[in-house]
Amino acid sequence: MKQITRNASLIAASAVLLGLTVPLTASAAQPPASGPPPLKWTTCEGTGLDPRQRCATVEVPMDYSDPDGRTIKIAISRIPSEKPSARRGALLLIPGGPGGDSLGDPSGKGQKLPQKVRDAYDLVGFAPRGMAPSTAVDCKLDPADLGMTKLLPWPAPDGSVTESMATARRTAGACVRNGGELIRHISTANEARDLDRVRAALGERKISAWGVSYGTYVGAVYSQLFPHRTDRIVLDSNNNPDHTRVTRGWLAAFETGVEDNFPEFAAWASRPGNPHRVARTPAEVRSGFLSLAARLDREPLPWPGANPPRLDGNALRQTMLTSLYDPDDYPVLARTILAARKGTVPPVPEAPPESVLQNVAAVGVGTICNDVDWPASAAEYQKGVDESRARYPLTAGMPRGPMVCAAWPFAPREPAVRITGRGPSNVLLVQNERDVATPLSGALKLRQALGGRAVMVTVNSTGHDAYLANGNACGDRTVSRFLAGGKRPGSDVRCA
């Protein structure tokens, strides 16, 4: 789930599922006995890419229960090992989301990997099914429904979910009309099956992976479906794998994630000498934020160019949520608070092109609605929102609100994959203690589910994405040693 809010991905829309099929198994995703055709590597499109990076496409079934039926294309990228004599295999860079892609990652974050890791692996990125330039989907949502306070189910100022339910019905309807057949087949399990086709197309007997955020769930599902195809697996910023809730559980986790992280912002925002200081004490930062959000609920400020074009309480709360992903973004929230107190507004945050938002939203819809069934009862969501607002005022009930899947008219085609400890012991989890999107409490659930397959490195750090990002040197060294040389701690450790 790489930064669910930044990708606008947890939010997106709905899909069409025609009928029920027999649950799929791992064996259904195996490539044909004759093997895949050789890949045709070409120059990658885009700017700022490493000249060594090359791109190709892999053909996969759209519907794995009909492997001889219609096919779709998965775009992949690769930078080869920098030392062929030290090459171990391929390292798959699994993006967050749902709605993210890693096509540029071999040229980007992959180049932050230590030299020994870059020597040991070809770095491989991809665009998941539905994401351009793979065969893409689009729900053609009304542009007003692409705003973040629409995409995430922020309740009305009085806590009502009526408007959120209406947005869910509108979004679901657009995806049913416009999403095409492919959106019915977008799911985490199918992404994992696609990755095994990519592995085979690369000519690898086994594959290593570095999955981040939602990518940790993809990596865990791949390791469950294809345990003996896995080499060294790093899962970074981990989701609770509860197969009965999946994204519903991840959304609910924002309650604890914000409470884990807001004290860090409050300490920073009250520090003497900070040019963005908003209060004298951490307690005043919190109370001031809640008071300002309530005032903006009553008296929103015009915010020309924003979507929607007003700075209301939910826009402030969304800014808070987004800014807690990375301590480097704390000034964004502080500047918004300081401006709103004066009755002014900050610059409008830069947004991706509408075509990108539409694509991300559609992939998010397919994933979250096809993975698991969501309740349809507004009363059930209202009860949860009311309880959440009372216990977790910073998030104002949003984590238990109705997303688009509340209006999803079709049942999932198969049960969500249940993560277990069956398989080789070759997984390393790395997790920051204070992570707003994938809290430590959820990561511990994944650790428990994997049992003896995994070891966990808990990092005393703040922010989403641990390895080579918001973690610390101890955690980075531990992961690098595992990837480069296979050295994994004998038991769970904490990097202080």
Image: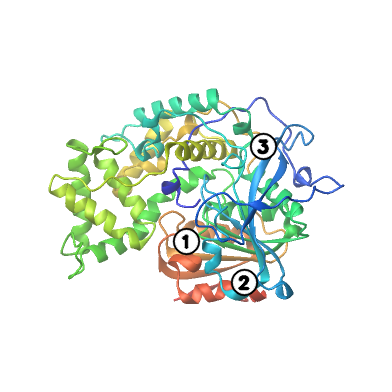
Circles 3 and 2: CB distance less than 8 Å? no
Q: Which mark is residue 117?
A: 2
Q: Which mark is residue 414?
A: 3
Q: Is residue 1 above or below residue 492?
A: above
Residue at position x 54%, y 43% in the image: 245
Tell me the distance, in whole angstroms, between the alpha carbons under discs 3 and 2.
37 Å
Looking at the picture, how far across and down is residue 441, in whole percent?
47, 58
First-in-chain label (1 vs 2)? 2
Identified by mark 3, the residue type is: Glu
SS type, badge 2: helix
* Foreground residue among 418 and 194: 194
First-in-chain label (1 vs 3)? 3
SS type, badge 1: loop
Image side of residue 33 versus residue 370, left or right: right
Q: Is residue 215 above or below residue 488?
A: above
Residue at position x 49%, y 77% in the image: 474
Which residue, given by chain and number where applicable, does mark 1 sit on?
A: 465
Residue at position x 47%, y 42% in the image: 10
Tell me the distance, in whole angstroms, between the alpha carbons under discs 1 and 2.
19 Å
Image side of residue 230 versus residue 308, left or right: right
